[in-house]
Image: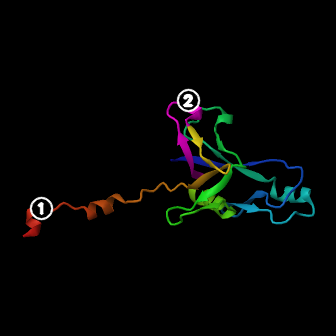
Amino acid sequence: MFIEALMVFKSYKPLKLEKGMLFIVQQPRFKEIVKLDRVPANDEEFIRINGYPVEPYIIDVVNPNLPQNELILATPEQIGWFDEGDWCDELCDIEVRHYNRIIEGYDGYVLIEVDYDEEADDADMFKPVLYNNKVTISYADLEDEYDDDDDEEEYETHTESDFD
């Protein structure tokens, strides 16, 4: 089963910058995640301009009363598989384009695959499912597949006089 959760990006102070680190870049109208494709000549200058690198976390937003350390559903090392949806039969590695669409199109909300244990306490009720030590997430499409107006048109009721 999938539940709604929130992907957040937390900054950290690395010992040195490395290829593949993620950064949040402020564009004129939106924020964008970018991946460091080469190590800059001057780490300190790069950080002064771009800020510290960030890592993605997935947190439980269903129960805000839980202590902070129990809210985390997935750590950066566990975020790896992405389900593109019904049109694709395979999972893929999560990419920067997915992060950006999650931020821009879904305000950070994602769906994460979990096992549900109704006998567990609130903090352990939903356990993320891990495949090769990685969780599976997808876009949080909150729209219904069917529009109510379309259903009414498709299943109109007819009276006997309609068939005369």
How much space separates mark 1 and mark 2, taking CA atoms? 53 Å
User: In x, y percent, where is residue 64?
Assistant: 59, 36
User: In x, y percent, where is residue 112?
Assistant: 57, 49
- Does the magenta-highlighted stretch encompass residue 52? no
Query: Tag on residue 159?
Result: 1
Q: Which residue lies furthest to the bottom in this view?
A: 164
CB contact under 8 Å: marks 1 and 2 = no
Identify the residue under disc 2: 121
Q: Start and end of the magenta stretch?
A: 108-125
Q: In this view, does 160 lie above or below 76?
A: below
Q: Which of 7 and 137 is in front in this view?
A: 137
- Does the magenta-highlighted stretch encompass residue 113? yes
The three-letter code of the residue at mark 1 reads Thr
Residue pictured at 93% horizontal, 64% vertical: 41
Query: Is residue 75 something that shows in the picture?
Result: yes
Q: Kindly state the secondary structure of the residue where label 1 is placed.
A: loop
The three-letter code of the residue at mark 2 reads Asp
